[in-house]
Image (cartoon, rainbow, N blue to C red):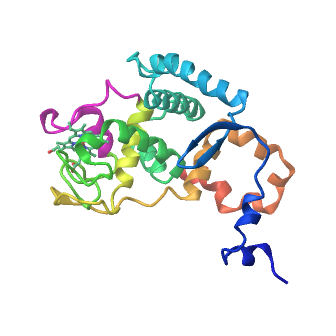
Amino acid sequence: MNSDKTSSTDGTQQDEIVGHIPDDPLTGHAYDGIQEFDNPLPGWWKWMFIGSIFFAFPYWAFYHGGAEGRTVEARYDQALAANIRLQFEEIGELKLDRPTVLKYLYEPSWLRVGQTVFKTHCVSCHGADGGGLVGPNLTDDEYKNIKDIGDFLNVLQNGAAGGAMPAWKNRLSANEILLVSSYAASLRGTEPASGKNPEGRTIAPWPDAPSEDAEASKEAESPEAESPEAESPEAESPEAESPEAESPKDNA
Ligand code: HEC
């Protein structure tokens, strides 16, 4: 059983190959004995090609003509800013205090928002991964102006070293300051590509995440949280008298 493939390798099948000439029209000229079929591109293809040439001029003028805010990068930044504003509506205006910095240190999805602030405003001095450039390394255990996690807020709002670390309170919103503080704190213990030598004093590790109990009692303190629970039938069950349920009184 000789298949076409095997028989064509022995060089005796030339006639057969030549015999496959389609009956398309020829252009009528030959180069070194090679003849050319007259197979023009389909009309739709040619018109798309011509159309794309004309499309290129307004496209170029629009995106690359130098107008503000039209480049892909600028549009990305605009979309990002719009998205952050949307997300901020979800959390409202955050309190600039120590418990809130600590709380958001343990909320990875919000740390990512802090990270976008950091990428925009801080990397020029602290490095893309916080390893430190002009500003100190934020990934080690040594700090110059920070003894406790709450101190980030002060440094961020008011700056440090006479403005070498700029004050951000008039340039960033309260939420941005808070989330970038938590993000800067979260850089501690990460491995930068190239870390600057430690500066300042070694400080104690960040406190653990606020415990579930603390959260629960905080919620119980707010007026909204009390009513539905008290009226539900479960509230009369023995579990309702568990220590958690009594914690608000303990805290008071
Ligand atoms: C113009 C450069 C510059 C920019 C931009 C900058 N920093 Fe700094 N930052 C510094 C310098 C310099 C210091 C050290 C101040 C000192 O010597 O006390 C510092 C200190 C800090 C510290 C305290 C570190 C320590 O060891 O005490 C934190 C936290 C910090 N910066 C976070 C940020 C964040 C977050 C941003 C972005 C919102 C930012 N910085 C933007 C220059 C900068």
- Magenta segment: 151-173
Q: In this view, does 68 lie to the left or right of 225?
A: left
Residue 70 is a magenta residue? no
Q: Is residue 171 magenta?
A: yes
Q: Which residue is drawn at 40% across and 17% down?
A: 65
**On-image quarter of the N terminus:** bottom right
Residue visible at 35% across and 55% down in the picture: 187
Q: In this view, does 204 lie to the left or right of 41?
A: left
Which residue is the extreme one toward the left? 162
Can residue 249 be seen? Answer: no
Vertical arrangement, residue 49 with respect to residue 185, above or below: above
Q: Residue at coordinates 75% horizontally, 57% vertically from top-left?
A: 240
Find the residue positioned furthest to the bottom.
1
Left or right side of 221 for 111:
left
Q: Which residue is drawn at 64% across and 46% down?
A: 220
Q: Where is residue 126 in the image (x, y as percent from the top left)?
A: 25, 46
Q: In which quarter of the image is residue 213?
A: bottom right
Q: Work out whether residue 190 or residue 54 is closer to the camera in this orientation and state it.
A: 54
Which of 63 and 48 lies nearest the eye of the viewer?
48
Ligand 1 occupies quarter = top left
Is 189 drawn above or below residue 80 in the view shown?
below
Residue 218 in the image, given as x and y percentages of width and height: 58, 46
Q: Where is residue 236 in the image (x, y as percent from the top left)?
A: 83, 54
